[in-house]
Amino acid sequence: MLFVYRTHYEGPLSKRVRRFPDLTVLDWFRRGWDADDAWEWVADELGGRVYGLSSVFEAAREHGLPRPETTDELRALLDEHLYVEGEVRRDGRGVRARTDDDEVELAYFFVEEEDDDRLAYHLQEWPLPGDAGAPAPFDPACDVTTLPPRGTGEATTYAVLLTHYDGETLARMAPFAFPGVDLPALAGHLRAATPGDDTWPPELLVLRALVAPGDTTVEPALRRCNQWPGFSLNEEPWPANMPGPHAEVHREALELIAVGDSTGDRSPDGTLLRVDEHLAQMAMHTNETFGFQQWFLFDTAWVAAHPVLARSLLRYAGHWDPFD
């Protein structure tokens, strides 16, 4: 059995994964039913706190609830006694919950079959593999926002931005696509593009602004993004005129990062960045409490070598439940 916790409090990819010998979710809950200290048992089992999960075990001890014998009995007990500020989904795949701790949204999953392709990114550690293949047609199988203008090539570059600046922190932004552009050509494409509406997210506007005239890849611009004085949970990380002409916004952006003042306790030195020819990945340190936010830029040459991982990552950005 597999446990996954999407939590902004842990690790460069903001998630925690544990595997157990239990054959079913029911077996795992039955093992903890009579724990003397429910909070401590859950933390020991799952490698740390899981918000609200101990509530069902605490209720079992407080009210003398019988240990569930069937999946239906477990579902009924979870419905009545599991504390979540969101929703719980219980089906043949296991138990999946979305909640929040009044600061950020969180989600956790107990899954009995971990070899499902939709879990590929959930099981991935930092960094993602960087090898690539020959670009080929690709169906992302999820909602993707296409950003004009279209490039002249055959490839497509995707942008997955697992970022947030308020309490809505899970699946808040669908992936983006630059059709006709591979990753090596993205820097030039960003320089030439003129965002004309509010479709471009602020992160990509900042990235565009920080591409220098001589940059041949996006790596230098990503390193400059890491020096941006915002990108914390408590600050507006962009000026209002970022969609303007590139020369103008580039000059202004350089002036802002030259100040070298990160907000709060954000530490650019704690950021992880790796750029391969067809995949760029950054786990940007935002602050000591909430850890990292993740940026992924990859094209269909990378997808060709990792189609399952690519689809899983795109779905991860678009919905909190991998099986939705």
Image (cartoon, grey):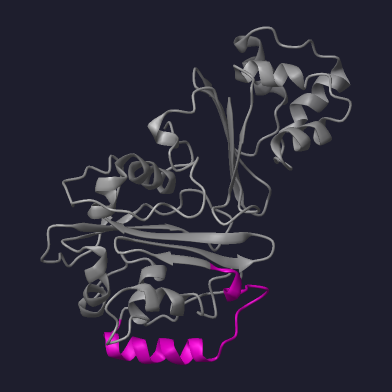
Q: Where is residue 55 in the image (x, y as percent from the top left)?
A: 76, 31
- Residue at the spot 24% in from the left edge and 47% down from the top edge: 304
- Residue at the spot 10% in from the left edge and 66% down from the top edge: 152
* In magenta segment, residue 6: no
Q: Quadrant of the C terminus?
A: top left
In the rendered structure, which segment of residues is drawn in magenta?
244-271
Q: In which quarter of the image is the N terminus?
A: top right
Q: Can residue 75 be seen by looking at this rendering?
A: yes
Which of the 4 quarters of the picture holds residue 43? top right
Left-right relation of 285 to 256: right
Which of the 4 quarters of the picture holds residue 161? bottom left
Which of the 4 quarters of the picture holds residue 253? bottom left
- The vertical placement of 81 against 314, above or below, is above
- The vertical placement of 196 against 293, above or below, is below
- Residue at the spot 58% in from the left edge and 70% down from the top edge: 232
Q: Where is residue 158 in the image (x, y as percent from the top left)?
A: 30, 57
Q: Can residue 163 be seen by looking at this rendering?
A: no
Q: Position of residue 115 (x, y in %)?
A: 44, 28
Between 134 and 219, which is closer to the camera in this rendering? 134
How many numbered circles does the render carry?
0
Left-right relation of 144 to 38: left
- Residue at the spot 75% in from the left edge and 26% down from the top edge: 56
